[in-house]
Image (cartoon, grey):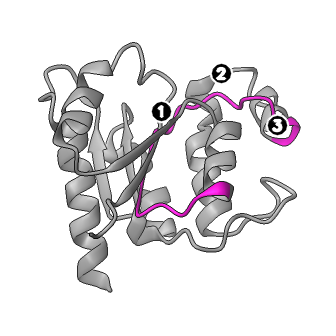
């Protein structure tokens, strides 16, 4: 029996505002799914496990790690301007040690990363291009309950096509 693809969704409001999106994901039974609600927790998961797909929000709180908290504080404790999700991705994919002093896990690749955020693609396109991230979906009112499941399917299909 083949194991299920592992998925990590890094999203601070998933349990509350977006719980309808997680239901279809669990119901499908297709994935081994984890949720991180801050950057510190996400890094813990990324160090402990290899994931086939990472879905990342742009607006994330830092969690308890001092380095991530410092980055957050430098922007005035504002998730909108801090954009810790993009900083996390830059640390992971560009291996930018000015963001965090510890090295990131070396298995994370752009083809395994998708961004799911309220920012428009135009607002963050330059970052996506620089990091090689091709899978993006903007959060907006009226999205289908299956949007997260579809985003993960798209990401895994593209990742398989690149192998």
The x and y percentages for residue 76 are 76, 21
Choose between 117 and 44: the one closer to the eye.
44
Q: Answer left or right for 90 relative to 130.
A: right
**Which numbered disc flags the more N-terminal residue, 3 or 1?**
1
Q: How many marks?
A: 3
Inspect the magenta stretch and tell me whether residue 65 lies in it.
Answer: yes
Where residue 65 is drawn, which disc sits there? 3
The x and y percentages for residue 96 are 73, 65
The x and y percentages for residue 73 are 81, 27
The local secondary structure at tag 3 comes to: loop
Where residue 11 is drawn, which disc sits there? 1
Q: Give how far apart the Cα atoms at labels 2 and 3 are.
A: 17 Å
* Residue ID at (58%, 31%): 60
The residue pinned by badge 2 equals 78
Q: Answer left or right for 26 relative to 103.
A: left
Choose between 162 and 81: the one closer to the eye.
162
The local secondary structure at tag 1 comes to: loop
Q: Which residues are magenta?
A: 48-67
């Amino acid at each position: 029996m083949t194991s299920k693809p592992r998925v990590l969704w890094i999203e601070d409001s998933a349990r509350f505002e977006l719980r309808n999106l997680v239901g279809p994901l669990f119901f499908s039974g297709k994935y081994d799914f984890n949720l991180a609600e801050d950057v510190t927790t996400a890094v813990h998961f990324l160090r402990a496990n290899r994931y086939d797909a990472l879905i990342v929000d742009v607006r994330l709180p830092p969690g308890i790690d001092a380095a991530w908290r410092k980055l957050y504080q430098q922007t005035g404790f504002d998730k909108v301007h801090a954009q810790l999700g993009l900083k996390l991705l830059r640390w992971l994919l560009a291996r930018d040690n000015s963001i965090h002093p510890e090295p990131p896990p070396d298995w994370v690749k752009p083809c395994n990363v998708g961004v799911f955020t309220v920012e428009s693609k135009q607002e963050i396109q330059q970052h996506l291009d620089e990091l090689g991230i091709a899978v993006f979906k903007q959060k907006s009112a009226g999205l289908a309950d299956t949007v997260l499941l579809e985003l993960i399917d798209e990401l895994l299909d593209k990742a398989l096509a690149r192998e």
